[in-house]
Image (cartoon, grey):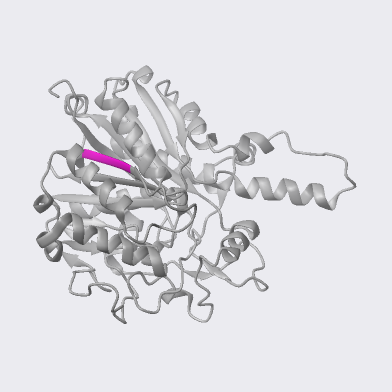
Amino acid sequence: MSSIRRVVVTGLGAITPLGNTAPAYWEGLRAGISGAATITRFDATKFKTRFACEVKGYQPDDFFDRKEGRKMDLFTQFGVIAADEAIADSGLLQSSVNKDRVGVIWGSGIGGLKSLQEECFQFERGDGTPRYSPFFIPRMIADSASGNISIKNGFRGPNFVTTSACASSNDSIIAAFNNIRLGLADVMITGGSEAAITESGVGGFNALKAMSERNDDPASASRPYDKDRDGFVLGEGAGALVLEEYEHAKARGAKIYAELIGGGMSSDAYHITAPDPSGSGVVLVMQNALRDAGIAVTEVDYINTHGTSTPLGDGAEIKAIEQVFGEHTPTLNISSTKSMTGHLLGGAGGVEAVACLMAMQHGQVPPTINLHTPDPEINQNLNFTPNVAQVRDVRVAMSNTFGFGGHNTSVIFRKL
């Protein structure tokens, strides 16, 4: 094991429903602000759910020239923006870094849904003659974000996308982690992005009866662990991390946020959309992450839970946490930042990893908002960080993400 290299985080970036930079995102989290509001991207008046957590005040022309921007789907634009911020934050390009040893592994559960929808709608409105944009396929494919980040910066190391529904970003982080640990790269840009607030995205999740329909009060709709929760709220955006081999980061004098010490993966092997109510797959993934990190359960201070505000998923995850952490569970801070950002699907793990790292940096745990009516089926004696951020020295943080198909991932960060 002595040959396994240590991996640290040296840069952060985010564009989210709470703010369009990592610091602005953190301020929104810390203040307990909801990013949910009436959908503006299309006319949703006939949909069962008419609200979502959109990125606010976003104009592509603020970040891309017109020719460049039209070649990218919105999920790719978000990914490039978050990655740019993380790379700038790391100071990587101000160093004499070997770009052959810098890679990009990105996560997206859906990819270019907006581009796919637009081209199909356009064909349907036409006379049957196929008039598709030459940019259609490059915009739609899920690896467009990782490819564009690599091309823009000349990074020639490992480059691919992970697609495992809502676990995609954490899978990308773990893959990037392992590439550095095994000596295949020195630096990896990782995280994930999603932009599924479209007619087909909202309509599809409505058909699954997965989303909240609290149209009269969108800001209170995402309410993990609350008795009155009725489904998740769709979000969009991106979260990015620069991962770097420890000695490489020290040699160039990089700022270090924390060390990434473990990653776990598992499968429920139960159902394509429903979580295993026993929580056995979630128990396994957290145990795997703790084993990989080589730490005891008593060392964990904070868990950023998957916590989507769905009736089945929230309770199963908490039961699994109680099983894994035992007597230590009541001492944990637990929170679901999806109560504020909504659910970014394949981008969730990226923005939630940023939330964990910001919590460690600032000594404050972001809250679970909208938690007002205790659910008798969930142990309310635990500290869900209800409604208001709490001051805490977070030395070790765990972030959980789970996806349709039964995909489970968990990552663990430790303050140096």
- Asked if residue 20 is positioned above or below residue 50 in the image, the reply reads above
Residue at 41% x, 33% y is 105
Q: In which quarter of the image is residue 371?
A: bottom left
Residue at 54% x, 38% y is 142
Report the side of 103 relative to 208 (left or right): left
- Asked if residue 149 is positioned above or below residue 310 in the image, the reply reads above
Judging depth in this view, the residue of 212 and 95 nearest the camera is 212
Q: How many marks?
A: 0
Q: Where is residue 132 in the image (x, y as percent from the top left)?
A: 77, 39
Residue at 66% x, 35% y is 137
Q: In this rendering, does residue 63 appear at all?
A: no
Q: What stretch is highlighted in magenta?
A: 261-265
Judging depth in this view, the residue of 229 and 257 nearest the camera is 229
Q: Quadrant of residue 335?
A: bottom left
Q: Quadrant of residue 318?
A: bottom left
Quarter occupied by the N terminus: top left
